[in-house]
Amino acid sequence: MYKQYLECGKIVSTHGIRGELRVQPWCDSPDFLLDFEVLYLDKGNKPLAVEQARAQKNMLLLKLEGINNLDDAAALRGKVLYIDRDDAPLDQGEHFIQDLLGLDVIDADTGMVYGKLSDVLFTGANDVYELTGENGEKKLFPAIRDVVLETDVQAGVMRIRPLKGLFDDAD
């Protein structure tokens, strides 16, 4: 199920005395958030215009309209920021992680349901997907083309062809 407003980061502290915020981005990099003109609080119910944004190491320094001093900024500490998905077009074959979580992971050849996609881990070379079976058992598989054959977010399905020995200890 698509969410219109997607979590993009958390306000972790203030920066300076003029109302700037330090944001821990929950996206590929802080640079992704630099071009947004509006960010949202309260699951999209409260739009805030972005006056200025810049990346600093792995954080985002953000100045929002109406947040003009340290007290205003401090009141937002711990709040989650959201983006409107319509403001963030993706390239073909790219997906928001929030759209992937909960997909049924199915064997492309046998139709066997392994479980639901429960997490995405960032390892450097490629992402690793975690799935959780009905029995609560967690399994990992690489997010590479040889394994992930189809991702259909609309249908709620990810079809995979596990590498030999990936899910069964017998091989």
Image (tube, rainbow, N blue to C red):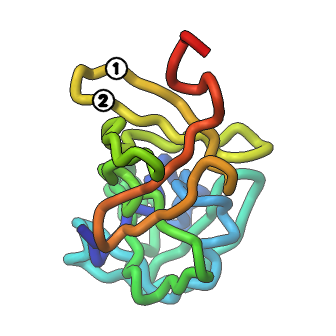
Q: Residue furthest top?
A: 170
Cβ atoms at labels 1 and 2 below 8 Å apart: yes
Task: Classify residue 64 as left or right of residue 165.
Answer: left
Query: Are there few (<14), some (14-19), or many (20+) residues within 10 Å of tag 1?
Result: few
Residue drawn at (40%, 68%) of the image: 152
**What kind of residue is marked 2?**
Gly
Residue drawn at (45%, 74%) of the image: 68
What percent of the width, then of the height, locates residue 125? 79, 44
Mark number, residue 133:
2
Say which quadrant the C terminus sits in.
top right
Instruction: Give the Cα separation between the discs numbered 1 and 2.
Output: 5 Å
What percent of the width, then of the height, locates residue 165? 61, 22
Q: Nearer the viewer, residue 138 or 89?
A: 138
What percent of the width, then of the height, locates residue 98? 39, 58
**What kind of residue is marked 1?**
Glu
Q: Nearer the viewer, residue 26 or 91?
A: 91
Residue linked to disc 1: 137
